[in-house]
């Protein structure tokens, strides 16, 4: 079995919805077990799950132009793993969610790439083309992101936003991560 | 008088519309003269105008995740100015336009910041808050960008897109650049 | 008087040495008062000092490819100021320190730019040319950075590293920030 | 057989030396054929070779804070391939060379990541730990880069610089790209 861990922080639940969809997408791939890890609750068992994973997907809201402090605390704690390159050659991916259509989401995703590269991981982006109707709430990849998933949430409860398109984008991304996890693990 | 030069490349006219609005915004500030420079037409006179400018605003479509090759050619040619730090302490700003709501526009804007910093310039962003209705075509700063102006254009002629909100965003940004140009030049 | 606040986090003291040099450089400019703010000790008085500042310089080690979690916590807390754009048009700058010559220091500095732009600040880089002998410990700007100051410290106590060149680079950068603070405040 | 193409631009020959070392490293892996492609000489045959490749490594000097205009021209031309996602799931990597120890090399490498992600490729970084003696000319990964290879060259002929450590770093990176190419191709 290939194991995918979605390691995320969510402030108000919107990023958690995205994380859940990524997990479901990954778990839909035959031969893949996927789980969520809220990084603010990381225990010894969580670090063991990360060590056993074939793929790790990083997720965080974009706060003040970058990954949240809660996510960064987790990233800094991963320095212990970095010393032994314990995540080397695992598949990596990422997603972020914020109020704006664009804003600085790219900044957060590029930070995830940088973190993954320090760990010697292999980065997998969305592999998705732009939507036919940019920004339309039902479209796949409606914000046009290739590095990782960008979701946009209004200031309403997480059951109302991000819209269906963003959630489906996250699900398809999770599927891609799961497939890549199986593919690279098989070799 | 303070002089603002909007140095841009436009492939199909959409970025030119944004450039035009930035120029008009700058020119609306008392004491400011503003002009457009299509970087593919840069002559000796253009380089003299840049040398005499108090502010230079960089503009380009986002092609394949970054500023266009035509813009980059101009940036590379500015190495001659860089050797003598001829643009040192001038005000700098930037804008980009592409099909997607987000995509990699941040990448292009961050390149403009990097270029400006090599030239020892002072970077001025949009100074704009996020819109009330993210993405709405009539909103100011509808894509939620602070580093520089992000505009989004559909695959239709430039008189139809980018929408009114993006054009007005560019005009207000030009005004901010013009004001900052007067302010820093006065000291 | 112009007021410069150097808001930094330091894990082992190396970044603190750089912060101290930036502060001294700023304070050397006639008409400038400069102070250090360790962001892990930020009190109500600290936020008042930041509100009263003409320039804020951000500093952090580069941990796992970005600003430290302690710095990011401060950045996230600055969201309160962001809502009212309380730092708008202040001068901004930044510096970072890490073990490597290059590594991901640019990532940390670009994050500082992004943060400053969200706050509507004006970014001032080093304005320094590359050194004659790249990397030499006595050279000004030995790592060749223009966005902000990059310092490199070995795993030895902070009185031994970063080297003299990096400390002098930081001092000169502080001077530039101080001068720009006076210049923009006067207008 | 797995095919690796090193697609690079070099202004004065230093980046070519790095490209050559990446190619040799890749070719040293059993089952891998590697070739150089000077992007300023790209022919129809070159685009066919890229289409047939299992891995593409991008290389460029860092000019004025980013990939050279010559490289960007190639990147923009790759939009034709992008429309059909012809490079999807190929392995991608990158390297850059410039005068400074750090400078804006990260900016160039991050552009390569962004380009690769638009193409739906899988990014492979150096997977290398920092050196024991940062900056020392004989050290592997002496500049401490994980996203891709950073080389530093003085203003002397390419047979004198970049130093042995950078060339060996490039060779080892090519080897890693070759191995990853075999691994992902086998699945």
Image: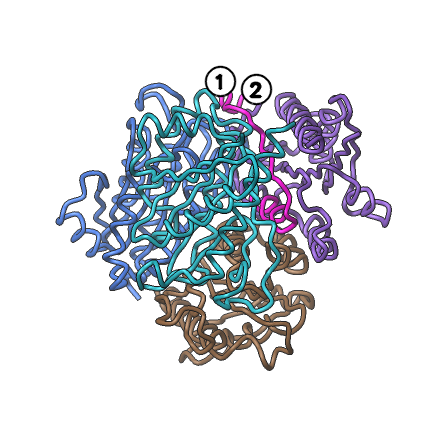
Chain colours: A cyan, B brown, C blue, D purple
- Describe residue D17's horizontal placement relative to residue C90 as left or right: right
Q: Residues within 10 Å of mark 2 (few under 14, many from 20)?
A: many
Q: Is residue D162 visible?
A: no
Quarter that holds the C terminus of chain C: bottom left
Circle 1 residue = D132
Q: Residues within 10 Å of mark 1 (few under 14, many from 20)?
A: some
Residue B47, how many percent across, how many down? Answer: 62, 64
Residue D119, given in percent of the width and then of the height, sits at 65, 49
Position of A36 relative to B123 (above/below): above
Q: Quick one: SS at disc 1?
A: loop
**Rendering quarter of residue D153:** top right
Asked whether disc 2 touches disc 1, contact meaning CB atoms under 8 Å apart, the reply is yes
Identify which residue is drawn at 67% across, 66% down: B42
Total residue callouts: 2
Q: Between disc 2 and disc 1, whose residue precedes?
A: 1
Q: Residue at x 54, y 50 (%)?
A: A172
**Residue B117 at x, y percent in the picture:** 48, 51
> Range of the magenta residues?
D110-137
Q: Is residue A93 left or right of residue C51?
A: right
Give the answer, above or below, for where B92 lies relative to C159: below
The one of A146 and D138 positioned closer to us in this rendering: A146
- The chain identifier of the residue carrying mark 2 reads D
In the image: residue B95, left or right of residue C27: right
Q: Is residue B101 above or below residue C130?
A: below
Q: Which residue is mark 2?
A: D139
Task: Examine the rendering and report whether any part of residue B6 can be seen.
Answer: yes
Residue D55 falls in image quadrant = top right
Q: Is residue B25 magenta?
A: no
* Chain identifier of the residue bearing label 1 in the image: D
Under circle 2, the secondary element is: loop
* x and y, in percent, of residue C182 in the image: 29, 56
């Amino acid at each position: 079995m290939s194991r995918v861990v979605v390691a995320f922080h969510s402030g108000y639940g919107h990023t958690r919805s995205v994380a859940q969809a990524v997990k479901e997408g990954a778990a839909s791939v035959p031969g893949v077990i996927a789980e969520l890890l809220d990084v603010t609750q990381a225990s010894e068992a969580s670090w063991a799950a990360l060590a056993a994973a074939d793929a790790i997907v990083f997720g965080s809201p974009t706060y003040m132009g970058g990954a949240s402090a809660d996510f960064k605390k987790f990233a800094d704690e991963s320095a212990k793993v970095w010393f032994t390159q314990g995540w080397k050659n695992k598949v990596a991916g990422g997603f972020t969610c914020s109020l704006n259509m664009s804003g600085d989401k790219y900044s957060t995703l590029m930070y995830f790439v940088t973190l993954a590269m320090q760990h010697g991981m292999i980065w997998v982006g969305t592999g998705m083309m732009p939507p036919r109707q940019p920004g339309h709430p039902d479209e796949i990849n409606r914000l046009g992101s290739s590095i990782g998933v960008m979701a946009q949430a209004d200031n309403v409860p997480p059951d109302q936003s991000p819209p269906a398109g963003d959630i489906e984008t996250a699900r398809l991304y999770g599927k891609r991560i799961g497939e890549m996890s199986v593919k690279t693990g098989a070799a």
